[in-house]
Amino acid sequence: MTTPARAPDPAPDPAIVARLRAAGCVFAEDEARLIAEAASSPQELEDLVAKRVSGLPLEPLIGWAEFCGLRIRVAPGVFVPRHRTEFLVEQAVALAAPDAVVLDLCCGAGAIGAAIASRAGAGVELVACDVEPAAVRCARENIEPAGSVYEGDLYDALPASLRGRVDVLAVNAPYVPTDAIALMPPEARLHEPAVALDGGGDGLDVQRRVAAGAGEWLAPGGSLLIETSGEQATQTAALFQREGLSVRIATSDEYDTTVVIATA
């Protein structure tokens, strides 16, 4: 399971800081501390620094990403949770009763589900699923045994016993238009799976499929929360309105993000 994030050790090696800064790492001192903490020997430290300098993302190198105050286990080739998604977690926690059934759909490493469960309480029944095997392996480390993780394509992965029982359905489905992937930072476009990024021609392909099945899985009065972009929010909201759900759009300047909330 996830553990609370803790402050890294102070006093990074100035030589490592200089190497990281020269490679373009904006937060070179923080990264040097985290890499030193992750290394178990001088040779491993050198290997990690060399890989970071070559352009590999930090989080898979050290094995975790900080999200909502938790250390979320991540591995190479797995989508790294973004801090902007913490806004979705805050909105979901506000809707989650102490005994809520929570589903983290397109869960990636399971960060959203783990964070909701950590804040909403031990009575939450947590289920998560993803289509990408490496992500599912990480999600199981982050969620089990407090929750259950399934591998498969959207709702097809879920046990039938969950149908009509989901109180909070949290989704961070891919919503980047295919042509825009080339414009993403190299840490994402070169090192994260396309299935976690590519939302199709207009970015809404996976969201359409999520909307089409939501009503079957939500409990009466249950809510679905899905991250989207400010430019796509109206279109995303319309997808769920067409499925008979009540919809509102929540935005955050602090997190620079948008969440569509659809209620059965």
Image (tube, rainbow, N blue to C red):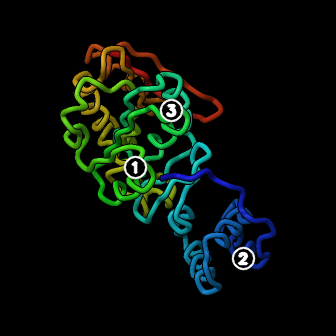
Is 73 situated above or below 257? below
Point out the tag, 3 or 2, that comes first from the N-terminus: 2
Q: Circle 2 sits on which residue?
A: 16
Q: SS at mark 3?
A: helix
Q: SS at mark 2?
A: helix
The C terminus lies in quadrant: top left
Q: Position of residue 152 (x, y in %)?
A: 23, 48
Q: SS at mark 1?
A: loop
Of tags 2 and 1, the one toward the viewer is 1
The residues bearing labels 1 and 3 have C-alpha atoms spaced at a distance of 23 Å
Q: Circle 3 sits on which residue?
A: 88
> In the rendered structure, which amino acid carries the disc numbered 3?
Leu
Q: Circle 1 sits on which residue?
A: 145
Q: Position of residue 142 (x, y in %)?
A: 45, 52
Whether residue 81 sits left or right of residue 176 in the image: it is: right
Q: Position of residue 11 (x, y in %)?
A: 81, 69
> In the rendered structure, which amino acid carries the disc numbered 1?
Pro
